[in-house]
Amino acid sequence: MGELQNFVRDDENDTLLFERLQEHVLEHYPNPDRVGCFDRATLITFVETPGRLDLEDPKYLHVFRCAECTRDLMELRRLREERIRQAATRSAQRTPRWWWYAGVAAAVTIVAVLVGVSRTHDRRQPVETAQAGVAVPVSVDLSSDGLARDGAKSDAPAPIPLPRRVIELRLVLPYYSPAGSYRVTVSRDQSESLIEASDSAQATVEGSHTELRVRLDLGHLTPGNHYLGTTRVGDGAPYYYPVVIR
């Protein structure tokens, strides 16, 4: 009764039934002389493509009365199941690798696009890059402009042209200007409330000439009239010179 209950609980392939049947054949139907046995090709067809055999033919009942054929069929089924497992494992291993290669290819494509965009952007803005990164040397000589540090004043000088760039300014101050620390500014009017660029440096005296060097970023200024201011630290209000930004 217990065995009958086990068969009732068997799977859809009747695995338990066939295992018991195989055990019964192996135990009760030995055939050491291989009398009436099928050749290996027929046994392989039994396992791989049984639909190709006419299993209603009584001759195939031999396998149920031959321990040797049953043992061969068991081995062929084991080999088939092992082959299926290995194929499934290889397929599972190939799938992540395929996705890995696909991911690498996608990343390479994105990098190529970004590099292309970057190069296009660089080609479109060669002037702006050069203006922002390279300072232009500019020399301005105020020595004969008539504005001495004693406050005397002559006619207003003509506007000094300055490029709308980052500049390295060599500034020669009016005659007899003292050495010391100076602040140089560029502003929209003659006041310190609208300063748009500035830098400080030490002025040195050589004979009757006093000069200094400052770096001014004029790239963001609006083209037009501005004022260049010079102030010796501690001396009070700046001296202003008209400039035009181009």
Image (spheres, rainbow, N blue to C red):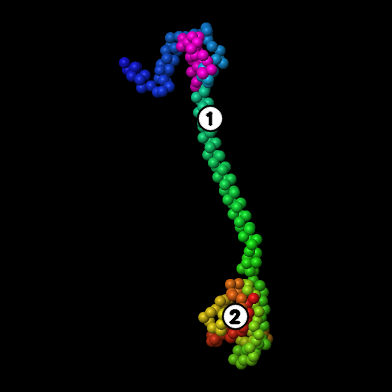
Name of the residue lying farthest toward the left: 1
Determine whether the residue tagged by mark 2 lies in a helix, strand or loop: strand
Asked whether residue 62 appears in the rendered view, the answer is no
Which residue is at a point 60% across and 52% down the rendered structure image? 113
Residue at which label 2 appears: 226
**Residue numbers of the magenta segment:** 50-78
Q: Quadrant of residue 42?
A: top right
Q: Mark 1 packing: few (<14 Cα in 10 Å), some, or many (20+)?
A: few
Which residue is at a point 40% across and 17% down the rendered structure image? 17
> Which one is nearer the viewer's eye here, 161 or 84?
161
Q: Amino acid at mark 1?
A: Ala
Residue at which label 1 appears: 87
Label for residue 168? none
| In this rendering, the label closer to the viewer, 1 or 2 | 2
Query: Is residue 65 part of the magenta span, yes or no?
Result: yes
Residue 155 in the figure: left or right of residue 235: right
Which residue is at a point 53% across and 20% down the rendered structure image? 49
Question: What quarter of the picture does the N terminus occupy?
Answer: top left
